[in-house]
Amino acid sequence: MDLLSTLVDKGLRRELPTREEALAVLATSDDELLDVVAAAGKVRRQWFGRRVKLNYLVNLKSGLCPEDCSYCSQRLGSKAEILKYTWLKPDDASKAAAAGVAGGAKRVCLVASGRGPTDKDVDRVSETISAIKEQNEGVEVCACLGLLSDGQAGRLRAAGADAYNHNLNTSEATYGDICTTHDFSDRVSTVQQAQAAGMSACSGLIAGMGESDADLVDVVFALRELDPDSVPVNFLIPFEGTPLAKEWNLTPQRALRILAMVRFVCPDIEVRLAGGREVHLRSMQPLALHLVNSIFLGDYLTSEGQAGKDDLAMIEDAGFEVEGSDTTTLPEHRRPCGGHADTEAAAGETCAPQAAEDAGAPAATVPAPSDEARRDLVSVRRRGAGTDLPPNA
Ligand code: SF4
């Protein structure tokens, strides 16, 4: 059986591809791209139909972070001219969230810069969660506040947080190249704390930071082992004023291959197309809807996305539909604990992270920068949360 038939077969059975197969997806040629998208699209439709879940970001606290994540415009020493503000008041955050919900968002993601919250910050966010839940019936709330300390996950869960996001971002082997103030295991531990407290775990990656194909496959397999319910795939937005400003490594074709690989490794998990979609996929964005079942509506934390109404038009034009709040995102076998695949599914998975790597797998390569820097596509967010201007939703 050829590669794509094998991957479709496995995806429909919720069986993990081998590491060699995941690498082979990344090594496919442009001639094969539509076949790759069509194959991963079959897996996407099996578990998520043609539904697209919309998520809306509210940046509760922007900039001035003491950590040094090199991809981040809010990092220590960042010269990016982003909005900088301290904690939004619960009512202001709730108003911003309501705009997203009115635009069709089912989940609101409350994000704050920083290494992690203090207990006082957790109180503050708990108030914000209550305000949002009171004013927006049925909305899912995800908190993204950095590394958690003992007991904080339980307190957020008790306050009504449905989910917690903390991304692994890149492979364990290269984590030290993108950040020196915390490590990969800190991130894994926070995701596990969120799961243990009963929150749905959301954890993903950033592609385009100069990593190899092997690094990408490593981080996606590491995520799969953590078994989150949602996996956001970010494509680096190379902000001027950050150490990765010159990393323009992605083409739309490569971005699609990466999304297809993630779909094959995470067949029945919410795969969310996150930051950098407009910058790197550009006019190819609609094709990505065949691979992912979730996107962000409107703007990102510190940069602007395409207009929310254009997101909605794109979904409709491509023949997909916005997922309503009365529909459960995950397929039935992954409910209702908000956490993990049932044991039957877990037993059926064949996680083979290493075996095939040396057996003729395509060589892992760092793609040569093939695109000119498109700085014109990166615009700092100047509206929405933390400003007097209405949000883009
Ligand atoms: S901890 Fe978060 S906000 Fe701070 S630099 Fe890292 S990614 Fe940015």
Image: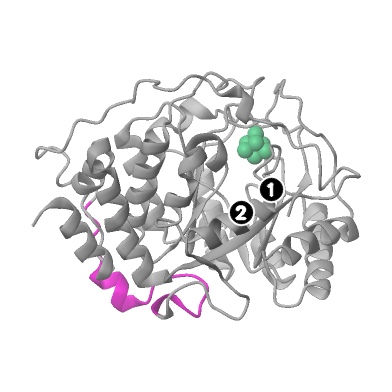
If the image is split into quadrants, where does the C terminus sit? bottom right
Residue 325, percent from left and from top: 63, 76
- For residue 241, above or below residue 272: above
Nearer to us in this view, 360 or 148: 360
* Residue range corresponding to the magenta coloring: 333-352
Q: Is residue 229 magenta?
A: no
Q: Does the stretch in magenta take in 338? A: yes
- Residue at the location (85% across, 44% down)? 386
Placement of 202 over or under 155, stated as above or below: above
Q: Is residue 113 left or right of residue 26?
A: right
What residue is pinned by disc 1? 307
**Residue 144 seen in this snapshot:** no
Mark 1: amino acid: Ala
Q: Are marks 1 and 2 in contact (CB under 8 Å)?
A: yes
Tell me where residue 384 appears, x and y as whole percent. Answer: 81, 47
Main structural element of the magenta stretch: helix, strand or loop? loop
In the rendered structure, find residue 340 and report the number of the disc placed on it.
none
- The x and y percentages for residue 135 are 83, 72
